[in-house]
Image (cartoon, grey):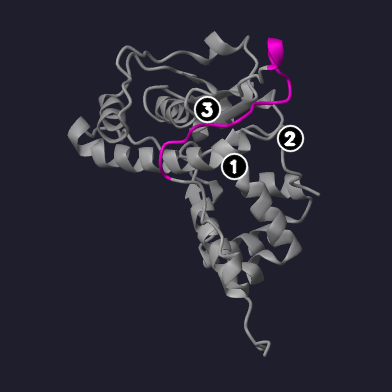
Amino acid sequence: MVPTGRTAPAFVRMAAHPLRWRLLTALAAGDYRVRELVDLLGHPQNLISYHLRLLRGSGLVTARRSSFDARDSYYHLDLERCAHALAEAGAALHPALRLDPGPSSGPSSGPSSGPSSGAAGGVPARPRVLFACTGNSARSPIAAALLRHRSGGHVEVTSAGSHPKPRMHPNAVRVLREHYGIDLVGRRPRHLDTVAHRRFDHLISLCDKVREVHPVFGDRQRPMHWSIPDPAAPGDDDQASYPAFLRTAAEIDTRIRYLLPVLTHTTDPEVAS
């Protein structure tokens, strides 16, 4: 007998609305402010804000104040929560449709292929990724190190800052060494100007300030943004800020794991279609 009267899983009900699906698709590519989503999707701000509020209430989307302009907020899609919600939705329909909840948290062997433009001899070119922040001493080198580690060297990774610090933050070095087995010794922060002549397939900012004020981001079409606060709070000593560095590295690592499958594709998802 076919069961009837079942309520659709919460994720299915939430994502079934056409505009909410487009919001989810847009935010899957990176963090955005409301006015950017208005421009991207072509709907009035009050309508975008209403559906964002519903997505936040469901726990799929979170909001974080800009660390540069506190009057504004960035919206972020929790891909980990989405993965589990999709797995539950599949299982609710039929046990055989129980899905893998998402990318493994273990080390990745890396993308099997790069962009369509290959190197000589038919070897695919490695995707080129630039991580940018202000000081290039914490968030961006952590992201670069984790992507390099999890891709197994199959991605060409660079990090730089608009106002680089004299040295890597000790807690960035310590967290990567103690929890990920990655050694940053010998690396130094570098300026964005030193990579201005290079072409990157993916440009990812991790700092609200560098995204909002640095001109390099105006030259690219929809660069990806991860709105992540600086774990080095002013006035904190290294011991006091260490837990913040642990949380920051964990958040970046989760985003890296969901970035890896994106790097195997040659085209961007159609956000506005």
Using the image as rendered, state which of residue 58 and residue 53 is in the foreground.
Answer: 58
166 left or right, relative to 97: left
Element type where label 3 sits in the image: helix
Does residue 78 appear in the picture of this structure?
no
Residue type at the position of mark 2: Thr
* Residue 82 drawn above or below residue 250: below
Tell which tag, 2 or 3, sits nearer the viewer.
2
Residue type at the position of mark 1: Gly
Element type where label 1 sits in the image: loop
Q: Which residue is mark 3?
A: 210
On the image, the x and y values in percent for residue 55 come to 59, 63
Picture quadrant of residue 54: bottom right
**Residue neighbourhood size for the residue with mark 1, other residues' Cα within 10 Å, grouped as few (<14), some (14–19), many (≥20):** many
**Residue neighbourhood size for the residue with mark 2, other residues' Cα within 10 Å, grouped as few (<14), some (14–19), many (≥20):** few
Q: Which residue is mark 2?
A: 267
| Residue at the image position 60 percent from the left and 12 percent from the top | 196
What span is in magenta?
105-122
71 left or right, relative to 188: right
| Residue at the image position 67 percent from the left and 51 percent from the top | 25
**Residue neighbourhood size for the residue with mark 3, other residues' Cα within 10 Å, grouped as few (<14), some (14–19), many (≥20):** many
Distance between the Cα atoms at labels 2 and 3? Answer: 26 Å
Which numbered dot is residue 30? 1
Q: Is residue 120 magenta?
A: yes
On the image, the x and y values in percent for residue 89 come to 59, 68
Distance between the Cα atoms at labels 2 and 1? Answer: 15 Å
Q: Are marks 2 and 1 in contact (CB under 8 Å)?
A: no
Using the image as rendered, state which of residue 36 and residue 103 is in the foreground.
Answer: 103
